[in-house]
Structures are given as structure tokens and as C-alpha cells.
Amino acid sequence: MTAHSVHVTLEFCKLCDWSYQVWLNHREMFDDNPRAKELQSSMGAEALARLRTISHEYTLLQIAKLHDPVVVAGQVTLGIEYMVKYGAWNATVSATLGQLAEELNAFAKGLRTIRNKALSHNDLAAVLCGATLGEFEENKDIRYFATLQQFVNVVHEEVIGGLWPFDDLVRNDVAAFMAMLKSRA
């Protein structure tokens, strides 16, 4: 038995799934898009560059929010730390979630600076120096979301039963959008 309600668990799963969807949308639309070079030299290149930045920053912010401390400015946040600390899990589940959380937190640690200095605030020193505020190894984001899927599946299985697969139909949405762009060109 866990201390988390079905409602809290579902909302947590939805937040993780949303982070996955916006990340996958960004990868499919910009990073892994076979038409990327063509689009970068198109008449809409400037608008697409802005959309790429908006999508990238929003994706990073959604991931970072999953790693907020349990209490921020006196308010309880729903994220990975909350799920681990207040689940009243049995020893086996607690150990599994703890290990997965460590892996997830290792990735998110690299996003903390960019979140605090650029995504959530306009840190004066960061703005003026223009330095890169965060980065991660190629495909480490893919591993992050595979691990997040494992974490969500354990939580969902323990509280509700069954798995909570992330919505990868985003790929179809991006493909349809790209087809629409091509047909209007």
C-alpha cells in the first residue's frame, strides 16, 4: 500500500507524459527532422528559428520542474522528489525508485543553472556574458526519458496497477504538420 492517492499518481504521470511529449515534439520537429536543412533555408527560417528556441526552452523548463524540491516558496510541488519521499513505499519499491531518481536527477542537475539563470529569471550576469548555461551529451535526453518511463511505470503499477506508457503519437502529429507544410510550399 502506498500513501499516494490515485488522483495524485495520475496527475504525476500526466506531468511526466507532458514533459515527454514536448521533448519528443521538439526532437521530431527540429533535431531529428530530415527536412531541417531545407527548412533552415526556407522563407520561414526566422519564424522556425524562434519556434525552435521557444520549444527548446519550454522543454527544458518542463523537465526541470519535475525535479523541483518538495517545497518551493512555501508551496508543495508535485515532482519526482515528492513521489519518492511521500509514497510510503515498501523497501523494494523505495530502493528502485531511489535508484531511478538518482539517474534522473543526474541529468536534471545540468539543467538547474539554465533554469535559474535564463528560463525562470533573467539573471543579469548571465544575460551580459552570453555564455552557454547548460548542455548534455548527445542522446542523454533519450536515456533520461527511458528512465523516466521506468520511474512512472513503477509508480503507476504500485498505486493503480499496470503501466503508464508515454504518448509517442506526437511523431504522427509532427509528420502530419510537416506534410501540411510541404503541401503549402
Image (cartoon, grey):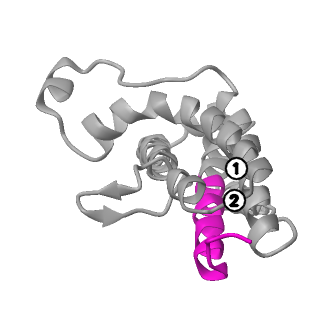
Q: Which quadrant of the view contains residue 40? A: top right
Give the image location of residue 99, x and y in percent: 69, 37
Give the image location of residue 128, x and y in percent: 14, 23
Residue in the picture at 68% in, 69% down: 2
Residue in the picture at 67% in, 28% down: 140
Q: Nearer the viewer, residue 56 or 66?
A: 66
Task: Name the kind of residue labelled 1 in the image.
Answer: Ser
Quarter in which the N terminus is drawn: bottom right
Label at residue 89: 2
Secondary structure beneath label 2: loop
* Magenta stretch: includes residue 86: no
Give the image location of residue 98, x and y in percent: 65, 42
Label at residue 94: 1
Residue in the picture at 67% in, 49% down: 24
Secondary structure beneath label 1: helix
Residue in the picture at 44% in, 52% down: 65
Q: Are marks 2 and 1 in contact (CB under 8 Å)?
A: yes
The answer to whether residue 96 is visible is yes
The answer to whether residue 35 is visible is no
